[in-house]
Image (cartoon, rainbow, N blue to C red):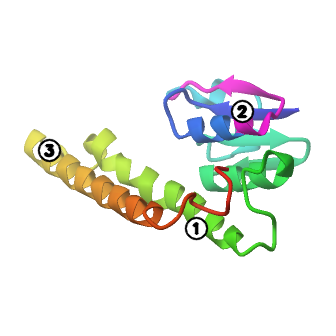
């Protein structure tokens, strides 16, 4: 059985959505954001205690991109990823990592400006820059989709 460690409202949502789309049987362990050491098995699955984290048998995974790529490979019948060896697989890698490394990271200044600045004016500037980065990322995505029906391959995976 797959176990997904999540914090509701976090990037864990992408992993949970992929498991649902794959038709996977899984259980969810909700991790309290301020008491991560209380979730049974969480530290063993991801010693950094960050979500999402996933466990199945001897498999231990952390990081949204890695989990999404694994789900695509683990459930090929769900067609969440182009077949291994297909040229479209490169686009699949590109967009999964883009979502995790560009789009998701871009939200941090908007959602958690207090990590980057102490006073209100500085936080407002950080948030504005974050919104600009998200808009730029969205335009990049729109530009791709003007010329492609899907992000990767010929299916909505």
Q: Earlier in the sequence, mark 2 or mark 3?
A: 2
Answer whether labels 3 and 1 touch (C-beta < 8 Å).
no
The location of residue 47, given as percent across then percent down, is 68, 46
Which numbered disc, 2 or 3, marks the residue closer to the eye?
2
Residue under the point 23% across and 56% down: 132
Q: Is residue 77 left or right of residue 31?
A: right
Where 119 falls versus 139 (above or below)? above
The location of residue 55, given as percent across then percent down, is 80, 41
Mark 1 Cα within 10 Å, few/some/many (few <14, many 20+)?
Answer: few
Mark 3 Cα within 10 Å, few/some/many (few <14, many 20+)?
Answer: some
Q: CA distance from mark 2 to mark 1?
A: 22 Å
So how many labels did they put on this image? 3
Q: Which mark is residue 20?
A: 2
In front here: 57 or 145? 145
Q: Earlier in the sequence, mark 3 or mark 1?
A: 1
Magenta segment: 19-33
Q: CA distance from mark 3 to mark 1?
A: 31 Å
Query: Could one spot residue 146 in this view of the protein?
Result: yes
Q: Earlier in the sequence, mark 2 or mark 1?
A: 2
The residue under label 1 is: 94
The residue under label 3 is: 124
> Residue 88 lies in what quarter of the image?
bottom right
Residue under the point 81% across and 74% down: 85
Element type where label 1 sits in the image: helix
The location of residue 97, given as percent across then percent down, is 57, 62
Residue under the point 8% across and 44% down: 121
Where 60 falls versus 101 (above or below)? above
Element type where label 2 sits in the image: helix
């Amino acid at each position: 059985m797959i176990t997904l460690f999540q914090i509701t409202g976090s990037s864990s949502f992408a992993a949970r959505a992929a498991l649902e789309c794959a038709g996977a049987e899984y259980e969810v362990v909700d991790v309290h954001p301020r008491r991560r050491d209380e979730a049974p098995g969480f530290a063993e699955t991801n010693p950094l205690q960050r979500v999402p984290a996933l466990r199945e048998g001897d498999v231990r995974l952390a990081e949204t991109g890695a989990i999404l790529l694994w789900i695509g490979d683990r459930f090929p019948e769900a067609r969440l990823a182009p077949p291994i060896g297909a040229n479209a697989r490169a686009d699949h890698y590109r967009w999964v990592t883009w979502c995790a490394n560009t789009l998701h990271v871009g939200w941090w200044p908007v959602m958690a400006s207090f990590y980057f600045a102490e006073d209100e004016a500085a936080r407002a500037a950080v948030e504005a820059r974050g919104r600009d980065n998200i808009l730029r990322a969205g335009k990049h995505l729109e530009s791709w989709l003007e010329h492609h029906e899907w992000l990767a391959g010929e299916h909505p995976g």
